[in-house]
């Protein structure tokens, strides 16, 4: 099949990393466009290296292309150099596989992974010559659909999308595409397609609803503009994760990407229930993949890609019940082929360290702990089931095992935080360094000293978490907290062993605005994009002053979304969505946080969050205690 590149050699020679734009990678799916009924383009609104590392798109790409009547292609945000050339030369944005313009596709599916990519969504639409606002689109424009974690509060960007898919993509897309084909066959309009789509589980058409506000700017209610639109939309979820689509032949890029390895998703969800963590609530209940299925996937994927590393992906790998068996199999498979095994998100305990020492025979890279808070009191508030004793014992075992570099992750600005909690970050870092000197005799300290890298990020309250009611700190408060942390570290005995990093406060504040925002933010985002804001998650491209100017010009107060603690009965912009976890449960957890009460994990005792309605996963495991009475 002849394929002409959308960009000339002259342009490709001018831009950084031309491999981002030429497609035709190993395992990329090529089809004859004359033989398919539907053309779907999957988009990750960031550069190629980041988008290509995203498992969700690989899963859907593989599933869509397994259907004969569909050709699924990919597109990513062109970096600033190519963006400029495409605008000057009026080159429409194109899909990697066919190099055809996106505007000629039936669907453009955009992954909403991170709030700071919102202006990049507008870049994609604009370069594709698709009107930014859905109300301005013509019959011939692609249907723009959003999915991913940020679709659980799609309101700030609702005006730019025709449709949102809430939940896991494997369940309803086939039905949606069949409706689309049927609608086209009968000469139905774009609106008729959206009306029919809104009847499918998991689909949300923003144009069919309107928010009504109270005097104080909070939401009074939602009005339906199309009578058959559903009142609430329940997330879609795959209950049998072993028997579902998986990208056995993932696309392998020509260039290095952020995560250059085979990714094996071992389970979905998390039993832990940390109160700040959105993923832990959205992906309930925990569903494990069968060990034998994973063994088969691992062998096939390594064979189909030629990668020399395999990573086990999940929110908390140590909680996967088949981890030992899977690892023993992988260690045998990988040792003779010199394939590295990477194990992110392990809890640091004797079991995990034993696992890691088996896996990391060759090089002992750094260990990561995420205490999240500097004091036990604050760890109880956020329900981080980790005591100081756990952390220090884990560190001692690690140092005995030969590790000398430890990374620690904390959050600043958590609800109820005091100065004591902040100073606890330096104290805990110091205590871990002291454990090293107590544990490792002088003659065995190969690098002389232990290296502790302490990083703080700023707490951002997210929808569908117990902290969705919480106030968020101002930029000035965040900077003061980072300064206090640094000061606390510098007073420690082992300060020379501790390196401190912190995030930028401006970006965190903006992320907090988008995370809990409503439809009033669409005009601010459009204006910021008009003024050149793009790649806001890249510090060299982020212009906070421009954003603040746009808020002022649109008459929107950013503090309304961040520094205000919410009333218990406030209607949130995302309340019409149902992620499976009830608002009553989240409120109970918010109150328990304020009382510094810990909730046990799902395997120890069910907390009655509501996810048992899906009838599977951890909720139905045999040895669990019964659901406590709802209060």
Image (cartoon, rainbow, N blue to C red):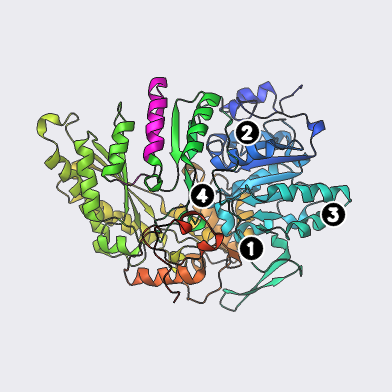
Marker disc for residue 233: 1
Marker disc for residue 82: 2
**Which of the two labelled residues, at mark 3 and mark 1, occupies the earlier sequence position?**
3
For the point 67% across and 22% down, the residue is 10
Q: Position of residue 367 (x, y in %)?
A: 30, 39
Vertical side of 33 occupied by 481: above or below: below
Residue 539 lies in magenta, yes or no? no
**Which of the two labelled residues, at mark 2 and mark 3, occupies the earlier sequence position?**
2
Find the distance from the CA under tag 2 to the CA under tag 3.
35 Å
- Judged left or right of residue 413, residue 587 is right
Vertical side of 382 occupied by 94: above or below: above
**Which of the two labelled residues, at mark 4 and mark 1, occupies the earlier sequence position?**
1
- Judged left or right of residue 445, residue 533 is right
Residue 311 visible in the current orientation: yes
Give SS at disc 3: loop
Q: Label 4: few (<14), some or many (≥20) within 10 Å? A: some
Q: Label 2: few (<14), some or many (≥20) within 10 Å? A: some
Mark 4 and mark 1 in contact? Answer it, CB < 8 Å.
no
Q: Label 3: few (<14), some or many (≥20) within 10 Å? A: few
Q: Which residues are magenta?
A: 324-348
Of badges 2 and 3, nearer the viewer stands 3
**Frontmost residue, 484 versus 284:** 284
**Which of the two labelled residues, at mark 3 and mark 4, occupies the earlier sequence position?**
3
Q: State the quadrant of the N terminus.
A: top right
Q: Where is mark 3, residue-wise? A: 189
Q: Where is mark 4, residue-wise? A: 543
Vertical side of 324 occupied by 545: above or below: below
Give SS at disc 1: strand
For the point 71% across and 47% down, the residue is 174
- Judged left or right of residue 552, residue 128 is right
Find the distance from the CA under tag 3 to the CA under tag 4.
41 Å
């Amino acid at each position: 099949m002849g394929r002409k590149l959308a960009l000339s050699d002259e342009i490709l020679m001018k831009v950084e990393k031309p491999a981002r734009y030429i497609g035709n990678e190993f395992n990329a799916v090529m089809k004859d466009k004359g033989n398919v009924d539907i053309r779907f383009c999957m988009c990750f609104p960031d550069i190629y290296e980041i988008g290509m590392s995203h498992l969700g798109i690989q899963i859907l790409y593989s599933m869509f292309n397994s259907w004969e009547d569909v050709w699924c292609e990919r597109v990513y945000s062109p970096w600033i150099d190519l963006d400029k050339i495409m605008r000057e030369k009026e080159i429409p944005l194109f899909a990697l596989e066919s190099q055809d313009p996106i505007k000629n596709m039936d669907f453009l599916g955009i992954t909403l992974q991170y709030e700071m990519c919102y202006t990049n969504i507008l870049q994609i639409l604009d370069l594709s010559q698709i009107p930014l606002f859905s109300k301005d689109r013509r019959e011939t424009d692609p249907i723009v659909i959003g999915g991913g974690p940020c679709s659980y509060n799609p309101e700030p960007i609702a005006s730019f999308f025709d449709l949102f898919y809430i939940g896991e993509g494997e369940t309803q897309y086939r039905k949606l595409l069949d409706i689309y084909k049927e609608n086209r066959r009968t000469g139905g309009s774009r609106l008729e397609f959206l009306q029919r789509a809104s009847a499918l589980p998991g689909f949300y058409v923003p144009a069919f609803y309107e928010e009504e506000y109270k005097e104080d700017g909070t939401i009074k209610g939602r009005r339906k503009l199309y009578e058959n639109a559903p009142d609430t939309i329940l997330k879609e979820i795959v209950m049998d994760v072993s028997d579902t689509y998986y990208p056995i032949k993932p696309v392998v890029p020509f260039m290095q990407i952020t995560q250059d390895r085979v990714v094996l998703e071992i389970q979905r969800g998390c039993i832990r229930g940390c109160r700040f963590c959105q993923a832990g609530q959205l992906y309930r209940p925990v569903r494990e993949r069968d060990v034998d299925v994973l063994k088969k996937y691992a062998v096939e994927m390594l064979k189909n890609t030629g990668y020399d590393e395999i990573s086990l992906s999940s929110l908390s790998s140590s909680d996967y019940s088949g981890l030992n068996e899977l690892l023993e199999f992988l260690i045998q498979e990988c040792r003779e082929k010199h394939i590295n095994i990477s194990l992110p998100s392990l809890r640091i305990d004797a079991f995990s360290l034993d696992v890691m020492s088996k896996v990391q025979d060759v090089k002992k890279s750094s260990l990561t702990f995420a205490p999240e808070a500097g004091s036990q009191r604050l760890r109880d508030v956020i329900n981080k089931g980790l005591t100081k004793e756990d952390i220090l014992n884990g560190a001692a075992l690690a140092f005995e095992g030969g590790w000398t570099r430890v990374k620690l992750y904390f959050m600043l600005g958590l609800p109820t935080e005091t100065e004591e909690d902040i100073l606890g970050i330096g104290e805990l870092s110091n205590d871990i360094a002291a454990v090293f000197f107590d544990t490792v005799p002088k003659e065995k300290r190969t690098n002389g000293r232990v290296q502790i890298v302490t990083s703080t990020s700023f707490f951002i309250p997210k929808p569908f978490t117990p902290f969705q009611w919480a106030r968020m700190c101002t930029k000035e408060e965040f900077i003061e907290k980072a300064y206090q942390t640094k000061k606390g570290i510098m007073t420690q005995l082992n300060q020379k062993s501790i390196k401190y990093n912190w995030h930028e406060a401006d970006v965190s504040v903006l992320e907090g605005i988008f995370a809990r925002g409503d439809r009033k933010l669409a005009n601010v985002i459009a204006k910021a994009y008009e003024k050149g804001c793009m790649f806001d998650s890249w510090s060299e491209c982020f212009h906070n002053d421009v954003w603040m100017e746009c808020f002022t010009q649109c008459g929107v107060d950013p503090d309304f979304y961040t520094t205000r603690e919410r009333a218990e009965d406030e209607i949130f912009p995302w309340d019409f969505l149902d992620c499976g976890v009830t608002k009553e449960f989240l409120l109970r957890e918010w109150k328990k946080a304020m009382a510094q009460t810990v909730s046990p994990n799902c395997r120890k005792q069910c907390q009655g969050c509501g996810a048992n309605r899906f009838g599977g996963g951890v909720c139905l495991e045999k040895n669990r205690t019964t659901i406590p009475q709802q209060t």
